[in-house]
Image (cartoon, grey):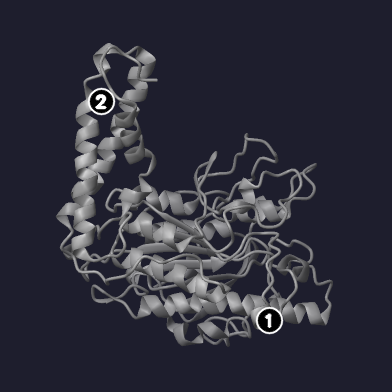
Amino acid sequence: MFITKKHLSRRTVLRGLGATLALPLLDGMVPAAAAIRNTAANPVRRFGAFYVPNGMEMRRWVPTGDGRNFEFSQILQPLAPFRDQVNVLSGLCDAPAVPLPGEGIGDHARASATWLTGVNVKKTEGLDIRAGTSVDQIAAQVFGKETQLASLELGIDSVETLGACDAGYSCAYTNTIAWRTPTTPLPMENDPRAVFERLFGAADSTDPATRLARIRQDRSVLDYVTDRVAGLKLDLGSGDRMKLTQYLDAVRDVERRIQKAEEQSDREIPVVEQPVGIPDTFDAHAQLMFDLLALAYQTDLTRVGTFMMSKEVSSRAYPEIGVPDAHHGVSHHQNNLEKLEKLAKINTFHIQQFAYFLDKLQSIPDGDGTLLDHSILVYGAGISDGNIHFHMDLPTVVAGGGGGMLKGGRHLRYGDDTPLSNLYVSVLDKLGMPQEAFGDSTGPLQTLSEV
């Protein structure tokens, strides 16, 4: 507590804490990057990871043919218009999701928690969770120095637990795919209105005058709080001084972001009204969230995004496509033809939403190309055959041109023991962040690296 002889009203502290705790409201009020940075010689690259749960109907996922001589499968057919921007990868495995001796069940929790981290997670239902820093957050540590928002974590399912969590494992493992540190999972936001406010503040639209007014208001609050709090240090004990220093560091970071926002407030962006809430249907909800992510990329508010189409063990039904059954139940198909057909419908429905996002990015000019040309997007799952919780031969798609660092139009097959983490070593290298190793990697994916 900040209890001293100096007067500092509780209202002042709360105002200051509001500025700190509500950092997402200040992260993305206006575009972050100057257009001159995004040139043909040095395009701004974006990264996105998109997760689908409960496995895949693999017989309708895997393309026929290899290399450039392949045909899209039934499930992947919605990606056909983007063939030159898509690589389908077969054979990658998520070995850290395989249970260690004595771990037993928990494949769903391990699948989502290891998908972007590549490390075995600690089996616990308590607060002592441990996974690994996810690849998106490695990218965010670098890109976040140049953008107002380091990363954006999105989902469709409620932030409350949907369905059951795996026995013996904390729900934190199934509620997110993004881990800032091995012990800090990042929550997925499923409310479009909350996402909009995180990007543009508590304004009603992206109108320039509205954004600028909000920026000035937030700066005046921060100036007031900083002036009133900074003078307390001399009268506080060592423990409180440390807390106050951390608090002021957070305030200064917000000030930096506001200054960047003011400097770049004249950049033109689409005028978008604040969403009113969560749409009634899955596809409308997913597409609105994809629109917001595309807008965040377009305005360079962030260059890193993660997106969970649904959570593992999801009991969501999809009556709009003729599947009134719970997704998780259908995934345990026991080779029943009717269940396999329903699973394929769900898988196709999910990939249709991803195709919508690719089309959106392809329609937005960026530098000498489009947002899709300058992005690296990974779509996939931590389970292939949901019936047996198989973590090998994972369904994986890499889309986008990576700013000239990727060539598409290929079906690439790898050996059955090729770590999924090898893909992320290659991705980080193409994003300009070379890593000697990541997770359980054994090296980059050489074929993917050919341009």
Amino acid type of the residue tagged 1 in the rendering: Arg
**Residue 382, percent across and down?**
64, 60
Q: Which x, y percent locates residue 142?
A: 34, 49
Where on the picture, by quarter, is residue 391? bottom right
Taking the spot 62% from the left edge, 79% from the top edge, the residue there is 348
Q: Which residue is mark 2?
A: 229
As helix, strand or loop, the secondary structure at mark 1 comes to helix
Q: Please tell me which of labels 2 and 1 falls first in the chain.
A: 1
- Please say if 288 is above or below 228: below
Which residue is depicted at the point 63% across and 60% down? Answer: 311
Element assignment for label 2: helix
Mark 2 vs mark 1, CA separation in Å: 61 Å
Q: Is residue 411 visible?
A: no
Few, some or many C-alpha atoms within 10 Å of disc 1 (few <14, some 14-19, many ≥20)?
some
Q: Badge 1 is on which residue?
A: 60
Q: Name the spot of residue 233 as percent of width and height, x first.
A: 26, 18
Q: Amino acid at mark 2?
A: Val
From what the image shows, is residue 160 above or below residue 233? below
- The reply, left or right, for residue 126 in relation to residue 139 is right
> Relative to the observer, which residue lies in front, 330 or 65?
330
Residue 31 drawn at (x, y percent): 25, 60
Residue 201 is at least partly visible in this image? yes
* Residue occupying the point 48% across, 53% down: 135
Identified at 79% across, 77% down, the residue is 339
Q: Is residue 127 left or right of residue 438?
A: right
Residue 207, quarter of the rendered image: bottom left
